[in-house]
Image (cartoon, rainbow, N blue to C red):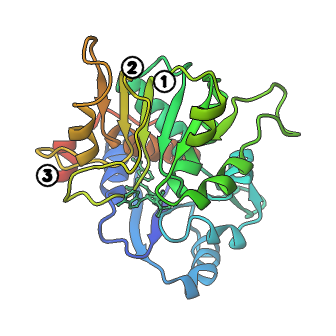
Amino acid sequence: MSGIIKLGVIGDPINHSLSPNIHKLFAERAKIEIEYLAYRVASSNLENFIKSFFKDGGTGLNVTLPHKVDCLNSVDEFSLIVKKIGAANTLRREKGTNKIFADSTDGMGLIKGLHGAKINEIKSDILIIGAGGAAQSIIHNLQDRHPRVIVIANRTKEKIKPVISRFPPLDYDDLYPNTQVVDIETYINQWNHQGFHTVINATSARKDSDFKWCESLPIEDATNFYDLSYSMPDETTPFIKWARHQGNSSVRKNISDGFGMLIHQAALSFEIWTGIKPDTNISKGELFNG
Ligand code: NDP
């Protein structure tokens, strides 16, 4: 590949983003030249920024909060996943047509993050705590793995129903029935429930206080706990501290934070833009201290 590849991430705020450092590492290891910058973009300037970035020769943008939904107003085409979840984290300019194409790598990033954490068996009942953008961005890929059921618990109950209705067990794009997505009350009261084996934290609950949940959850047999949030190298997320005291203490538990997902969703974006699968063997130390 010749010439510098112009990439970036947009959000507001954006100074916390680790994406520039992650992509710098990917590019160094792949021996290609990129420019990847973090841009703070206000909502009022979103459409103008996206259009100008690509018009001026940009190849790809990552999109983070609060623009993951509204960025879709500025694009020409969407992937199937973006159509389902109504949000994107990766934009690219299509060679030839110059059209802007929106994709989402969060869900596949999670699946790879789970595998990295040795959480390979996700066929049984899965609990997702949280019903915001991150929860919605992972449901489709989890449904695709055909667990028995995916259950949503959320602090604000009214927000669960609209999420569930986005993910019917079968729609016109699906060849086979997908796993049903239900709320926690339905699961407990109407299902022959077996209890959860995998618990995923998709809340943005504060990192500086203990993780607590407002209702009791059938997780006595849970062995897998995955936190979408991640911590600094020498810290532990509140959900992970909580998870250590939950679930089945008689077998080895797999407990992980979302650092793996972070790296893998970035790697999938990098591949979309460059065609290169980057080396994802990146430690927290390298990223935070490097
Ligand atoms: P949203 O703002 O869209 O959603 C936040 C969710 O957290 C809502 O369900 C909200 O519940 C819940 N919540 C917030 N505070 C609390 C609390 N104190 N107690 C209980 N529930 C709470 O955020 P996102 O979905 O975009 O992000 C969620 C998390 O996922 C973030 O920590 C983010 O960093 C992480 N993430 C990680 C990625 C990775 O690559 N590892 C990728 C994407 C996200 P309610 O509806 O009641 O307000």
Is label 1 or label 3 in front? Answer: 1
Mark 1 to mark 3 CA distance (whole Å): 40 Å
Closer to the N terminus: mark 1 or mark 2?
1
Q: Secondary structure at mark 3?
A: helix
In the picture as drawn, the residue positioned furthest to the left comes out as 234
Q: Residue 275, image x and y in percent?
A: 56, 40
Where residue 254 sits, quadrant-wise, is top left
Q: Which residue is mark 2?
A: 221
Tell which of 56 and 38 is nearer to you.
38
- Which label was assigned to residue 195? 1
> Residue sitting at 58 percent across and 80 percent down?
46
Residue 68 on image: x %, y %: 57, 64
Q: Amino acid at mark 1?
A: Gly
Residue 162 horizontal/vertical position (percent): 69, 57
> Within 8 Å: ligand 1 and the Cβ of disc 2?
no
Q: Are marks 2 and 3 in contact (CB under 8 Å)?
A: no
- The correct choice, above or below, for 224 with respect to 52 in the image is above
Q: Does the rendering let one see residue 197?
A: yes
Give the quarter of the image for residue 241: top left
Describe residue 190's horizontal placement relative to residue 30 as left or right.
right
The secondary element bearing badge 2 is classed as loop
In the image: residue 193, left or right of residue 237: right
Residue 1 appearing in the image: no
Q: What number is the disc on residue 275? A: none
Distance between the alpha carbons at the discs numbered 2 and 3: 37 Å
Q: Mark 2 or mark 3, which has the lower sequence index?
A: 2
**Mark 3 highlights which residue?**
289
Residue 146 relative to residue 19: left or right: right
Label 1 crowd (10 A; few <14 / some 14-19 / many >=20): some
Viewer-side residue, 81 vs 252: 252
Secondary-structure class at tag 1:
loop
